[in-house]
Image (spheres, rainbow, N blue to C red):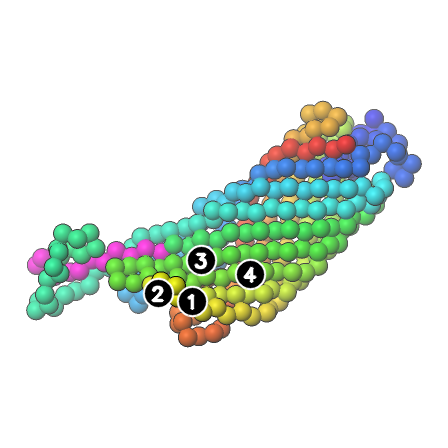
Amino acid sequence: IGEDNFLTPLLGTTCATADVGQCDRWPRWSVQAESIFLWRDNGARAQRPSPINNLSTGSAPFDVGIGPQVSLAYRVDAAKFWEAKYFSVLGMSGSAIGMDLLALDSLDPIPPNPADSLFQINRPFQLLRIDTRIQYDSEFHDAEINYLHRWGELSLLSGFRFVRLAESFCESGAFSRFTRNTNNDLFGGQFGARWCRSYHNLVSWDVTGKAGVFGNSAQQSQSRRMPSGEIPPTWTDAVVAFVGDLNFSANYRLSPVWNIRCGYNLIWLDGIALAPDQPFMLTNGRVVADGNIFLHGANVGLEADW
């Protein structure tokens, strides 16, 4: 069994032949099933929900998003491969609660129910406290298919990728509720490379980098507390976007078929519509799609090859 097997990180197998073109013992298929955990920055502009509110978009840091990641690889021969991959990350949410204090004129009437949690009168200063809340939710989906060609430890890849980023930003207070939603559907080709090393057919690692220019069908909609059955207006625009990512992964062989796999991901998107960046007007049909986000996090799971 050879010690330097470039496919061990990719397909998790062994081969004794130095000339991979003469090797007949590579597995044809490899399947990876993992969980992925991603954190994202809050890259939206620090807009205030109202002129007097003490909250900004950055007041709502995101929770970690969790989702499945699966990939399927097929070997055409010892140096050529097709690889399909899908992952989604849900639950990237952030929220914050703020308080505004409004001075009341001494002649203003006192609210009918001073004990109400939304209104607290603090005499003798005659202040009205209004609690406000912002809620920022997003989810991320990625599907791609790539062709790889190997030279030594280095493989070059090219392929097609689809990315969706969906967001919702809600601002609510005592008297109003305003929501902005965006969807970004990115389609395009990408290019990249993978560098693989293995040690004694037991531990291996690989680094994969990919980048591409994409067409983004960006969409935004806005709604207030609308009557039941009323559909909020929606606007769409086509813009150019960029997606790039790096993955660092390591494999540990458990058996001739099974491997345990873990890694870390860095993902950058540019040219996207972020929900808080959209104009604060229902009558404005613009889609502001000049935002960017950075995501990073770990993946861990199992790989089987045969």
CA distance separating discs 2 and 4: 25 Å
CA distance separating discs 3 and 1: 14 Å
Residue at x 58%, y 51% (from the top left corner) = 141
Q: Residues within 10 Å of mark 2 (few under 14, many from 20)?
A: few
Residue at x 42%, y 54% (from the top left corner) = 136
Q: Amino acid at mark 1?
A: Pro
- What residue is disc 1 on? 232
Identify the main secondary structure in magenta: strand
234 or 193, nearer to the observer = 234
Dot placed on the residue nearer the N-terminal end, 2 or 1: 2
Q: Amino acid at mark 4?
A: Asn
Q: Is residue 106 visible?
A: yes
Q: Amino acid at mark 3?
A: Ser
SS for tag 1? Answer: loop
In the rendered view, tell whether residue 31 sits above or below residue 135. above
Residue at x 52%, y 65% (from the top left corner) = 219
CA distance separating discs 4 and 3: 12 Å
- What residue is disc 4 on? 184
Dot placed on the residue nearer the N-terminal end, 1 or 4: 4
Dot placed on the residue nearer the N-terminal end, 3 or 1: 3
Q: Residue furthest top?
A: 255
SS for tag 4? Answer: strand
SS for tag 2? Answer: loop
CA distance separating discs 1 and 4: 18 Å
Q: Which residues are magenta?
A: 122-134
- What residue is disc 3 on? 168
* Quadrant into which the N terminus falls: top right
- What residue is disc 2 on? 226
